[in-house]
Image (cartoon, grey):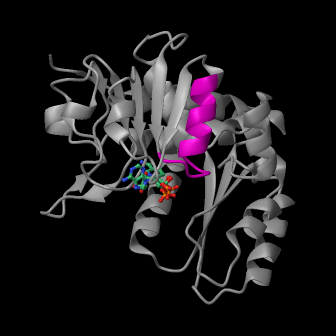
């Protein structure tokens, strides 16, 4: 069997076309959706991420501002900037790129963002809304993974989903979204003794670890949906995910690649959240 590829690039094109239409409609009413992106320090990967986010805004009719600060920026000064953006009517979404320098408490920063502008969906309120099934901003990466899973047309009711990883930004919200879609969910982590035992029973596997070849073909149930969130490099420095894609695609029913999978979808769902923030404001 050769799996159908779930292309995040292609799915993003469709969703971004809708985003552009909604942005144009808001702009025509004098309310162009606006995203503020804050980068502190000069982490090379973060610089690429923020550049891609700002470009995606420009390409789809959203207004964006990129604020770059030296790694020595104090926590108090960062909080002051967030306060100013909270009160800026041209800005509907605020994103502070993680990780932050060690002297800045990321929790304090996330909680300082107005809950109406928390388009990353990382605040305690957004997490609570997700947990209780209330409407709210869903964290962009798991939200994008759900769109990719939905694109297969497979009904999740009665299906077994395994999420590998339990971070607050990917693993846990991913598990909650799958649960909300009526899947039976197992969460695995570094303390799970036999990962393959769980994944071999799964109709859906989402790998969000950050370690190459965490999920190999022998760990996949034939026909399963496999979503690869991981971002790693192979021995040649080439971008790869957590899944052994070449072998896994011969067993899975659907599989997302890296690159061209979850990465573009994460940015797409950031645009969707920003549009929703503007529509609600
Ligand atoms: P994280 O905070 O480091 O969490 C990694 C998780 O993997 C932890 O829960 C950890 O378990 C678990 N883990 C580690 N080794 C394991 C093992 N051998 N077996 C099973 N579980 C294991 O990372 P994250 O922020 O969730 O991100 C995960 C990956 O996704 C990274 O590669 C990141 O770069 C990527 N990512 C991609 C996007 C995108 O847009 N494509 C967005 C976000 C993240 P413990 O909790 O027990 O330590």
Secondary structure predominantly adopted by residues drawn in magenta = helix
Using the rendered image of the protein, determine whether residue 16 is visible from the camera's viewpoint. no
- Residue 220 sits inside the magenta stretch: no
Q: Is residue 218 left or right of residue 202?
A: left
Question: Residue 269's x, y, as percent?
Answer: 56, 38
Q: Is residue 219 visible?
A: yes
Residue 6 percent coordinates (x, y):
33, 26
Q: Which residues are magenta?
A: 165-179
Height in image: 246 above or below 202?
below
The residue sitting at 45% across, 68% down in the picture is 47
Left or right: residue 204 versus residue 224 is: right
The x and y percentages for residue 48 are: 41, 63
* Image quadrant where one finds the C terminus: top right
Q: Position of residue 158 (x, y in %)?
A: 53, 10
Which quarter of the rendered picture does the N terminus lie within? top left
Q: Residue furthest bottom?
A: 72
Looking at this view, name the residue that lies furthest to the right.
Answer: 87
Q: 6 left or right of 61?
A: left
The image quarter in which residue 9 lies: top left
The tally of labels here is: 0
Vertically, is 202 above or below 237? above
Rendered image quadrant of residue 218: top left
Residue 166 located within the stretch drawn in magenta = yes
Above or below for 250 versus 232: above
Q: Residue at x 14, y 37 (%)?
A: 246
Q: Residue at x 58, y 80 (%)?
A: 101
Residue at position x 47%, y 26% from top?
161
């Amino acid at each position: 069997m050769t799996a159908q590829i779930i292309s995040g690039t292609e799915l993003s094109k469709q969703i971004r076309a809708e985003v552009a239409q909604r942005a144009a409609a808001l702009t025509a009413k004098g309310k162009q959706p606006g995203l503020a992106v804050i980068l502190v320090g000069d982490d090379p990967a973060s610089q690429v991420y923020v550049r891609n986010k700002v470009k995606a805004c420009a390409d789809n009719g959203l207004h964006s501002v990129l604020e770059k600060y030296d790694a020595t920026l104090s926590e108090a000064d960062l909080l002051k900037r967030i306060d100013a953006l909270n009160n800026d009517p041209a800005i509907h979404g605020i994103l502070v790129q993680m990780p932050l320098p060690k002297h800045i408490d990321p929790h304090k920063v996330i909680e300082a963002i107005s809950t109406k502008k928390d388009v990353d969906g990382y605040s305690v309120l957004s997490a609570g809304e997700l947990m209780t099934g209330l409407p709210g901003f869903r964290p962009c990466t798991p939200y994008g993974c759900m769109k990719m899973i939905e694109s297969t047309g497979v009904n999740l009711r009665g299906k077994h989903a395994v999420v590998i990883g339990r971070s607050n930004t990917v693993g846990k919200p991913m598990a909650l979204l799958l649960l909300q879609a009526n899947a039976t969910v197992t969460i695995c982590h570094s303390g799970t003794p036999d990962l393959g035992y769980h994944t071999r029973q799964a109709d859906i596997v989402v790998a969000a670890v950050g370690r190459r070849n965490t999920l190999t073909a022998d760990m996949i149930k034939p026909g399963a949906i496999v979503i690869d969130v991981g971002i790693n490099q192979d021995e040649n420095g080439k971008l790869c995910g957590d899944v052994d894609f070449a072998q896994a695609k011969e067993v899975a029913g659907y599989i997302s690649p890296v690159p061209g999978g979850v990465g573009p979808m994460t940015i797409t769902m950031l645009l969707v959240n920003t549009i929703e923030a503007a529509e609600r404001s």
